[in-house]
Amino acid sequence: MNAVPPVPLFVGPVELLLVGAVILVILFGSRATDIAREAGSAAGKVKKTRREAEKEIDEVKGEFEEGIEPIKEEAQAVEEEVKEVEEDIEDIETDIGGSTDDGPDRGVQLDDDEQDGPL
């Protein structure tokens, strides 16, 4: 007789679950690895695209700021001119207000028709 009793391949449900898990890992593990590689590749592409987009945004910002600078300078020049004109207007108003002259027609002889007034 045989002294060693035969050992069954599957002893219980726990062992069956372990074997099933190993089979699933073998079958789908390579697919999971492929998915992980694809995800990593996609993440790399996203990072690269983001870097390129950020570079383009910085370039556009620089061009925009360069374009705005002359406009700002021109606006400041116009503001200074407006202030000068306003000061000139105030000076003229002061001169007119302080003048005793009633206008450019003072002392001009009127014709007879003009003395009657408006029609």
Image (cartoon, rainbow, N blue to C red):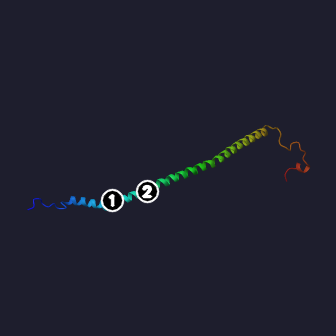
Name the residue tied to disc 1: 29
Q: Residue at x 43, y 56 (%)?
A: 41
- Tag count: 2
Q: Is residue 18 left or right of residue 104?
A: left
Q: Residue at x 57, y 50 (%)?
A: 59
Task: Give SS at disc 2.
Answer: helix
Horizontal side, residue 57 vs residue 78: left or right:
left
Q: Is residue 118 above or below residue 80?
A: below
- How far from the left and from the top, in percent, is residue 17? 24, 60
Seen from the viewer's position, the closer of residues 26 and 49 is 26
Residue at the farthest left position: 1
Q: Nearer the viewer, residue 58 or 9?
A: 9
- Label 2 neighbourhood size at 10 Å, few (<14), some (14-19), many (20+)? few
Asked if 1 appears above or below 105 in the picture, the reply is: below
At 60% from the left and 48% from the top, the residue drawn is 65
12 over 67 or under it: above or below: below
Residue 98, how many percent across, how many down? 79, 37
In the picture, measured across the screen, residue 102 lies left or right of residue 24, that is: right
For the N terminus, the quadrant is: bottom left
Name the residue rendered at 21%, 59% in the picture. 15
The dot on residue 41 is: 2
What residue occupies the far front of the structure in this picture? 1
Callout 1: 10 Å neighbours few (<14), some, many (20+)?
Answer: few
Residue 63: percent from left, percent from top: 60, 50
Query: Percent x, y for residue 7?
Result: 16, 60
Amino acid type assigned to the residue bearing label 1 in the image:
Gly
Mark 1 near mark 2, Cβ–Cβ under 8 Å?
no
What type is the residue that disc 2 sits on? Ser
Distance from label 1 to label 2 (Cα)?
18 Å
